[in-house]
Image (cartoon, grey):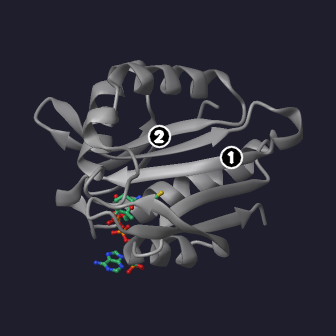
């Protein structure tokens, strides 16, 4: 899916990711490894990020967007959101959302702006009817964000995620239907 960029405020811009963003995307996913994402930092591969970005640009039911702020002559990626559409025809209008904001920019509205932008793009595309996601049961910040933006809990996957101390944590399944 290809979408137009949007200026939010204070130089905060949301735009579609390109292959050139693959290393910045990988950096944010590595940072998120200690802040609510599932993949460990040593499991994040910039090559895979690049392939996902290219795939999303070509598919009508997928999207990778980044949030950037000005940094000198360049811009700095401070957040990302992916909508990964299923390749199967019977699931083609269902996309899985994943996102992360760089920890030093948490609580500044970047996450909200990314979700609002992506859901609007998904709705406008006519290709995505349902957006699903999984988040850890103790990820209050994410659950509050998604609830405020129209996602509802659909169930729980019990004792799914193994923590470093050997205990397990539930994942919450949330979803939003196109209005
Ligand atoms: C979840 C995450 C994306 C939120 O991004 P963010 O930029 O910090 O969020 P925002 O500043 O836009 O805040 C959005 C909402 O989150 C909630 N929120 C923000 N900070 C919070 C905090 N410290 N405690 C509880 N809720 C909080 C609020 O409901 C807020 O809404 P409001 O602005 O109307 O008050 C970010 O914390 C993150 O990257 N976490 C790690 C990765 C992750 O958990 N991904 C989600 C799984 S898919």
Disc 2 to disc 1, C-alpha distance: 14 Å
Q: Is residue 35 left or right of residue 117?
A: left
According to the picture, the residue beneath numbered tag 1 turns out to be 95
Q: Is residue 110 above or below residue 121?
A: below
Q: Residue at x 72, y 31 (%)?
A: 60
Q: Is residue 38 left or right of residue 125?
A: left
According to the picture, the residue beneath numbered tag 2 turns out to be 65
Q: Residue at x 87, y 33 (%)?
A: 89
Write down which quadrant ligand 1 falls in: bottom left
Where's residue 139, x and y in %?
A: 40, 72
Helix, strand or loop at mark 1: strand
- Asked whether 101 or 132 is in front, the reply is 132
Q: Is residue 174 left or right of residue 37?
A: right
Q: Quadrant of the N terminus?
A: top right
On the question of residue 35 being in view, the answer is: yes
Where's residue 153, x and y in %?
A: 64, 75
Q: Quadrant of the C terminus?
A: bottom right
């Amino acid at each position: 899916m290809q979408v137009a960029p949007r200026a939010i405020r204070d130089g905060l811009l949301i735009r579609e990711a390109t292959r050139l963003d693959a290393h910045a995307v990988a950096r944010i996913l590595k940072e998120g490894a200690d802040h609510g994402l599932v993949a460990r930092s040593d499991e994040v591969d910039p090559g895979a990020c690049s392939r996902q970005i290219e795939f999303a640009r070509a598919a009508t039911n997928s999207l990778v967007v980044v949030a950037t702020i000005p940094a000198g002559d360049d811009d700095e990626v401070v957040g990302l959101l992916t909508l990964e559409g299923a390749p199967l025809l019977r699931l083609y209008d269902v996309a899985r959302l994943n996102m992360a904001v760089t920890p030093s920019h948490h609580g500044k509205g970047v996450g909200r702006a990314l979700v609002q932008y992506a859901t609007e793009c998904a709705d406008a595309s006519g290709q995505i009817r349902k957006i699903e996601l999984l988040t850890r049961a103790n990820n209050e910040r994410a659950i509050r964000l998604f609830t405020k933006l129209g996602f509802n809990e659909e169930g729980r996957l019990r004792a799914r995620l193994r923590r470093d101390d050997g205990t397990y944590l539930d994942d919450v399944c949330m979803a939003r239907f196109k209005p």
